[in-house]
Image: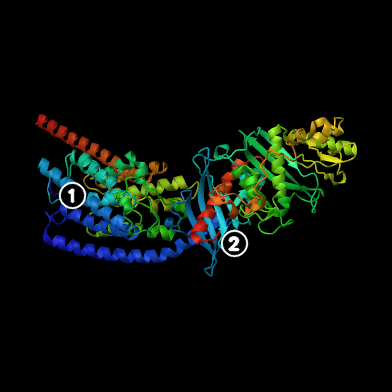
């Protein structure tokens, strides 16, 4: 039984205990808060110091990244004077094959530059990517602006995503290069994949007749080759992406000065691109693939110099033949008996001619009608819509299209990288992580595109 | 059978329970100070539900005193052993298991053989381990309450690398832990109060802690003896020693027997600590000691009866 006096007495004692506890807890809290802060900052520095160098870090509240399911934590780094340095984003990329890649990314506050990437090895189902491969990506992206995309050679599209097909394309890899170098010594080339009758991959670059000069894309990334507006590599990539969406080069609405207004971020002349794509489309129609093209190019060079391109040092590492035929203007032309120009020859026809094949004349080809038909397969493929001159697309034919990488408009991409050699898929895992970080920061900080 | 007061009129069961509740208050204050509204609600809820459940059972069975305060003690002790992210559903399950299955079905107040609060806590830990993982950093989200009604597995779990924490933080309870076991100073405050009020027998708790310290030192000497300090600070074993191992109902032995019980409990705790589940490390030793203690009581009682019968036969 509880007597009232005991209850009163113990209640008073309990109250005293509560007061004593509160006092002790306040003292304890005061003593430990500094220690806690030092410990936490030391932990952050150990963990993030090599990702983003800052004097101290603060974790953002989870509500700041609500809606970004991939992001688990975000930390902001500051200098001692309180000015922000950047952010460390802790995120997990879910890959297409249901594996995970846990990354830490560091991005500067003002320049949107990537400061570091680290792989955290705690995934339940780890993605098949090695630390060495992540280091390759880091080497290409750290200190560069985000967002990031794989460079033009990997501009690809899923055939199922394409609704507009050019009829009659044969599957395979097709290639065309300019026969003469431009004023800077560059020879533009296009390589194009066709799958299920759809152009699924396209790359536009240029090598230089001066073999010590880097390819145009690489030179532009390194600042050695500059054009007005975006980097040439960026514009090349944007254009390739656009063509994959549109499929038909005529819809690029090239104007008479060679430019286009319909592709964001593209200010250069797209004429070489359109001409070479048209050529590739013609080759695809014919089934004249890249290997055949290279074979005929080899025949022509061998005919001219009585030696193989390899021995002449004309082969690039990728196997392309670097030669400008400007000294042999008639090699690709056909004349009648009176030396009157009839028409241009294709690469295959020129190769046939120099290797002892017949150079057909107008009469042998069966007159003008036959001339049109025969020529339709090469440089001047008559079946291809020449396009809407001066950028005019008739009312009702302009399509709205979305072109994005990781949900980011291509025009926002700031850095193009080569990625992991031979593995665009694994490269994309890491790039996705970087771009998710960018998307969050763009929204959080209100960055303009 | 009804239990009777057996020590002194100033220290009957009800008074001792009231003193235990007072001794638990520092831990309750720490819980609220560290985890805010969630800790307060959990503590009041478990204590109130335990009282209601036992009151209902006593009315149904007609056994026990309705003025008994042990349900409140059990409810508060149970709450102190819960992670701060525990939902009320899990807390209710623990209370119902402890009050009905462990305490009610085995004779009620004074007749139980294991501590019902520890049994209830262990029950939810074993059956729903993923739902008992809601640990939070101290001093954040003090007014948060959603976890109390969350039917999902807690998402946020704070890091439990206690060796990263500084000694001052560990002593002050500034690390994620069960809501009431984290601050050694608060537990010691309660212990001092119980000693002053002569409401605790120290044999079992002291032996329990001593064996744990020795055992952990033997384990940790190969790596870092600082880990022993960290374990004593963070595991809640001091809380278990003061408020569970000293339970006179389930660990009622004195003198050497009490020391022996404490040593057995300590050895079990050291062995379990190597497995790494803090709730199991905390709850299993008192339960094991309760069972052993109950068995020894039974054999003592049977031996006395045998001797009495033998004496009568001789006469």
Which mark, residue A236? none
Is A17 or A118 nearer to us in this picture?
A: A118
Is A260 or B181 nearer to us in this picture?
A: A260
Residue depicted at 54% across the width and 55% down the height:
A438
Same-chain status of marks 1 and 2: no
In the visual, does B104 lie left or right of A52? Answer: left
Is B181 or B205 nearer to us in this picture?
A: B181
> Residue A31: x, y in percent?
41, 65
Q: Give the residue at mark 1.
A: B51
Asked whether the viewer can see residue B1, the reply is no
Q: Give the residue at mark 2.
A: A111
Chain containing the residue with disc 2: A
Q: Foreground mark, 1 or 2? A: 2
In the visual, does B161 lie left or right of A315? Answer: left
Residue depicted at 70% across the width and 32% down the height:
A287
> Residue B283: x, y in percent?
32, 44
């Amino acid at each position: 039984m509880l007597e009232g006096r005991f209850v009163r007495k113990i209640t008073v004692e309990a109250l005293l205990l509560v007061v004593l506890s509160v006092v002790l807890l306040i003292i304890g809290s005061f003593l430990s808060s500094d220690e806690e802060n030092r410990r936490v900052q030391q932990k952050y520095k150990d963990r993030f110091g090599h990702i983003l160098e800052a004097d101290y870090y603060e974790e953002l509240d989870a509500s700041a990244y609500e809606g970004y399911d991939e992001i688990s934590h975000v930390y902001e780094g500051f200098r001692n004077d309180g000015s922000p340095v950047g952010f460390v984003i802790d995120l997990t990329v879910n890959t297409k094959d249901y594996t995970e890649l846990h990354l830490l990314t560091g991005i500067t506050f003002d320049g949107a530059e990537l400061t570091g990437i680290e792989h955290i090895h705690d995934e339940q189902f780890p993605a098949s990517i090695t630390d060495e491969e992540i280091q390759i990506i880091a080497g290409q992206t750290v200190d560069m602006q985000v967002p990031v995309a794989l460079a033009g050679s990997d501009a690809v599209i899923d055939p199922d995503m394409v609704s507009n097909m050019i009829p009659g394309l044969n599957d395979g890899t097709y290639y065309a290069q300019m026969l003469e170098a431009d004023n800077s010594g560059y020879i533009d080339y296009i390589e194009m994949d066709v799958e299920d009758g759809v152009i699924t991959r396209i790359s536009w670059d240029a090598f230089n007749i001066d073999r010590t000069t880097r390819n145009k894309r690489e030179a532009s990334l390194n600042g050695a080759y500059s054009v007005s507006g975006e980097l040439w590599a960026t514009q090349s990539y944007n254009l390739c992406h656009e063509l994959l969406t549109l499929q038909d080069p005529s819809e690029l609405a090239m104007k008479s000065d060679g430019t286009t207004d319909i592709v964001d971020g593209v200010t250069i002349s797209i004429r070489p691109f359109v001409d070479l794509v048209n050529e590739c489309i013609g080759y695809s129609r014919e089934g004249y693939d890249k290997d055949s093209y290279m074979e005929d190019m080899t025949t022509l060079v061998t005919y001219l110099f009585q030696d193989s391109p390899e021995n002449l040092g004309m082969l690039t590492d990728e196997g392309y033949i670097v030669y400008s035929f400007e000294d042999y203007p008639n090699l690709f032309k056909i004349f009648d008996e009176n030396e009157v120009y009839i028409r241009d020859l294709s690469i295959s026809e020129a190769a046939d001619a120099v290797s002892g094949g017949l150079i057909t004349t107008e009469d042998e080809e069966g007159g003008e009608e036959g001339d049109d038909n025969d020529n339709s397969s090469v440089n001047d493929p008559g079946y291809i819509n020449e396009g809407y001159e001066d950028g005019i697309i008739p009312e009702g034919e302009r399509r709205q299209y979305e072109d994005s990488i990781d949900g980011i408009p291509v025009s926002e991409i700031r850095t193009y990288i080569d990625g992991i050699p031979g593995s665009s898929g694994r490269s994309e895992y890491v790039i996705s992580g970087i771009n998710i970080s960018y998307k969050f920061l763009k929204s959080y900080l209100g960055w303009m595109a | 059978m009804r239990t009777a007061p057996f020590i002194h009129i100033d220290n009957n069961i009800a008074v001792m329970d009231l003193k235990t509740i007072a001794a638990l208050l520092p831990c309750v204050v720490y819980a609220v100070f560290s985890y805010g509204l969630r800790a307060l609600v959990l503590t009041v809820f478990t204590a109130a539900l335990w009282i209601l459940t036992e009151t209902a059972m006593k009315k149904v069975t007609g056994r026990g005193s309705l003025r008994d305060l042990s349900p409140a003690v059990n409810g508060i002790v149970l709450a102190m052993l819960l992670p701060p992210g525990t939902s009320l559903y899990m807390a209710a399950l623990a209370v119902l298991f402890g009050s009905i299955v462990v305490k009610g079905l085995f004779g009620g107040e004074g007749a139980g053989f294991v501590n019902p609060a520890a049994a209830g806590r262990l029950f939810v830990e074993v059956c729903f381990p993923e739902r008992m993982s809601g640990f939070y950093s101290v001093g954040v989200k003090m007014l948060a309450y959603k976890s109390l009604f969350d039917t999902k597995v807690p998402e946020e779990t704070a890091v439990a690398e206690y060796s990263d924490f500084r000694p001052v933080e560990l002593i002050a309870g500034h690390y994620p832990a069960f809501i009431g076991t984290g601050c050694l100073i608060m537990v010691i405050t309660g212990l001092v109060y119980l000693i002053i009020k002569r409401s605790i027998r120290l044999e079992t708790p002291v032996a329990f802690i001593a064996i744990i310290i020795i055992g952990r030192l033997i384990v940790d000497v190969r790596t870092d003896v600082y880990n022993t300090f960290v374990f004593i600070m963070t595991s809640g074993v001091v809380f278990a020693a003061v408020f569970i191992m000293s339970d006179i109902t389930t660990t009622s032995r004195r003198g050497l027997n009490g020391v022996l019980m404490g040593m057995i409990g300590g050895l079990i705790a050291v062995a379990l600590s190597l497995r790494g589940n803090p709730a199991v490390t905390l709850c299993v030793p008192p339960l094991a000691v309760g069972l052993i203690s109950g068995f020894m009581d039974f054999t003592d009682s049977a031996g006395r009866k045998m001797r009495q019968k033998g004496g009568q036969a001789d006469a």
